[in-house]
Image (cartoon, rainbow, N blue to C red):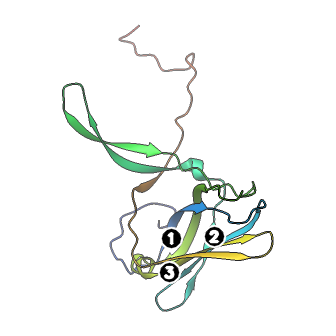
Amino acid sequence: MRNGKFREISDPDEPLQFELFVRCWLVSKVFSPTNITAVQMRITRANHSVVESERVPEDLQNWRLGKLAEEEDSRGIRRIKTANEEMPPLDLVEPLLAGVARDGWLHYNVQNISLSDLKAASIDLSVTDQTGAVHHSTMSGPRVIPGRVWPFAQAPFIHENHAPKNPELV
């Protein structure tokens, strides 16, 4: 993004703003319920400088994971179309139970990083539990993204009394 608008990246070294979406799976090995008290993401460039990121909570209803889906109609004709999947947020309120996996998405806004820096950066996600223990997960190097995340807006509801009328159908 540049100035709040999406655009094609023409220079991979130009600093931009990125919306970064992280899908997380959490499993507790502790037998008592475990509360999550904090989640932080840290991006470290190859030159070891840290890039600031800001978590954007409670807005995943405005985004969809878009994937291509192949479909065959009744005549045997195959078509490729896009499918939009919701991205449920990671529940950070309910305690984790031993051995019960929890998954969901987190959304971060990352400022002033280039695409080439982002591809080479390490990304560290830290989860802090109620005992103060910090659990890390780190990714580094280029990442393969299984789909594309697109902005999503609900279609406005139009009451039938206010719907536009087609004069040819009246």
Observer-nearest of 23 and 64: 23
Q: Is residue 169 left or right of residue 154?
A: left
For marks 3 and 1, give the one nearer the viewer.
3
Q: Residues within 10 Å of mark 2 (few under 14, many from 20)?
A: some
Res 54 label:
2
* Residue 62 x/y as whole percent: 56, 49
Residue position marked by numbered label 3 in the rendering: 122
Q: Earlier in the sequence, mark 2 or mark 1?
A: 1
For marks 3 and 2, give the one nearer the viewer.
3
For marks 2 and 1, give the one nearer the viewer.
2
Q: Which residue appears at 70% of the width and 76% of the height?
A: 134
Marks 1 and 2: in contact by CB < 8 Å? no
Query: Residue 167 sits in which quadrant?
Result: top left
* Residue 18 x/y as whole percent: 49, 68
What is the distance, in whole Å, between disc 3 and disc 1 at their CAs? 17 Å
Query: Residue 144 sits in which quadrant?
Result: bottom left
Q: Amino acid at mark 1?
A: Gln
Q: Which residue appears at 50% of the width and 46% of the height?
A: 152
* Residue 168 x/y as whole percent: 35, 11
Q: Is residue 101 left or right of residue 151?
A: right
Secondary structure beneath dot 1 equals strand
Q: Amino acid at mark 3?
A: Ser
Residue position marked by numbered label 1 in the rendering: 17
